[in-house]
Image (tube, grey):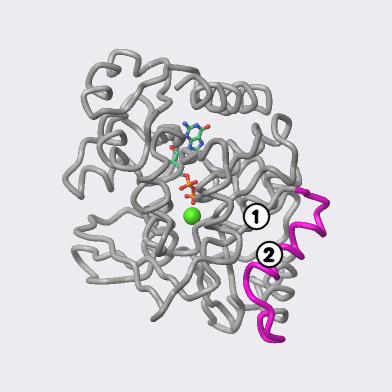
Amino acid sequence: MRVAVLCGGVGAARLLRGLVPLVDGPDLTAIVNVGDDLELHGLHVSPDLDTITYTLAEAVSAERGWGLEGETWQAMDMVKRYGGVDWFGLGDRDLGTHLFRTHRLGQGATLHEATAEIVAAWDLDLHVLPVTNDRLRTLVTTVDEGEITFQEYFVRRQHDVAVTSVRFELAEGLLPAPGVLDALAQADVIVVAPSNPVVSIDPVLVVPGVTELLRSRRDDVVAVSPIIGGKALKGPADRLLVELGRESTAVGVAEWYREIIGTLVVDDVDASLTADIEAHGVTCVVAPTIMSDLKKATALGQVVLNASASR
Ligand code: GDP
Ligand code: CA
């Protein structure tokens, strides 16, 4: 069975970890948000790609959900000493990833090539594709600072500021990375990971061809709600939905995705929302969706694969 997964960072990495035991590596493709990417200290940082790689390599910090386990911060201490940019922490080992990626990009490699090299070096055999090799940046308009980059909102402001709009800056002539549209066209099931709909999945959907493909295959598209009992497990997904005029519930998620998904998997605690979700023309499947360990993630992965098979 071939499976393509639209991905942000932590929520997506957890679901992918549950799918890895169920799908042959070469048949599993992660299509990953790059709207969060940033340049820092002259380095190209791709937070969502790295969260996925480190999680699948069982190297991620369990406490933070991003970055590496056993990380140290000596390089950042030096940056602080000099009064450099220190609001975005880069661990000492993690810096090696950014050095390698930036060097490869400087040599003329594309982001998808550099990513494939990084993923292979961690002995992972699934495909991890940035949704595009071209420049795509998520910009957030805040009430007090106007428009700022995603990471300034998420990390520097700790997403503790009201947002009035979100937009995506796309390079002229931006294209999907090689393999992205083929993976979506050939997948038996397309999964929308339980990532932030507004700032993790939307920047994947704006890449030309992606939304069109999902619309045309809507019955084969299954999303998992990142909103459980009206709240995001972590991060601002709940708040952003409300600020952008939606409901911060699994119903709000169904409404957000209604054009592109046939099925929404929601948590047991949201079982009572089934009728309201189905009123949006989206089949609702109820299951435990908190992936606190590998067993739970794999059980959810199986629910997702079955959900598409049963339509
Ligand atoms: P980021 O890019 O690292 O911020 O992460 P994502 O956009 O992928 O994910 C953030 C979303 O993942 C949040 O809205 C969380 O509620 C959701 N999430 C994280 N872990 C889980 C989980 O175990 N189950 C579900 N259903 N959602 C999760
Ligand atoms: Ca992210």
Considering only vertical position in the picture, is 239 above or below 15? below
Magenta span includes 107: yes
Residue located 41% across and 33% down the image:
219
Q: Which residues are magenta?
A: 105-125
Mark 1 Cα-neighbour bin, 10 Å: few <14, some 14–19, many ≥20: many
Ligand 2 is within 8 Å of the C-beta of the residue at disc 2:
no
Q: Tag 2's secondary structure?
A: helix
Q: Position of residue 17 (x, y in %)?
A: 66, 37
Q: Which residue is mark 2?
A: 115
Residue located 32% across and 53% down the image:
160
Could you tell whether 159 is left or right of 79 in the image?
Answer: left
Magenta span includes 160: no
Q: Mark 2 near mark 1, Cβ–Cβ under 8 Å?
A: yes
Question: Type of residue at label 2?
Answer: Thr
Mark 2 Cα-neighbour bin, 10 Å: few <14, some 14–19, many ≥20: many
Q: Position of residue 262 (x, y in %)?
A: 37, 32
Closest to the observer: 24 or 20? Answer: 24
Q: Using the rendered view, name the quadrant where residue 5 is placed.
A: top right
Q: Position of residue 228 (x, y in %)?
A: 38, 27
Task: Work out which quarter of the rendered image holds the C terminus and state it.
Answer: top left
Residue located 21% across and 43% down the image:
242
Q: Which residue is mark 1?
A: 128
Question: Type of residue at label 1?
Answer: Val
Ligand 1 is within 8 Å of the C-beta of the residue at disc 1:
no
Q: How many marks?
A: 2
Q: CA distance from mark 2 to mark 1?
A: 7 Å
Q: Tag 1's secondary structure?
A: strand
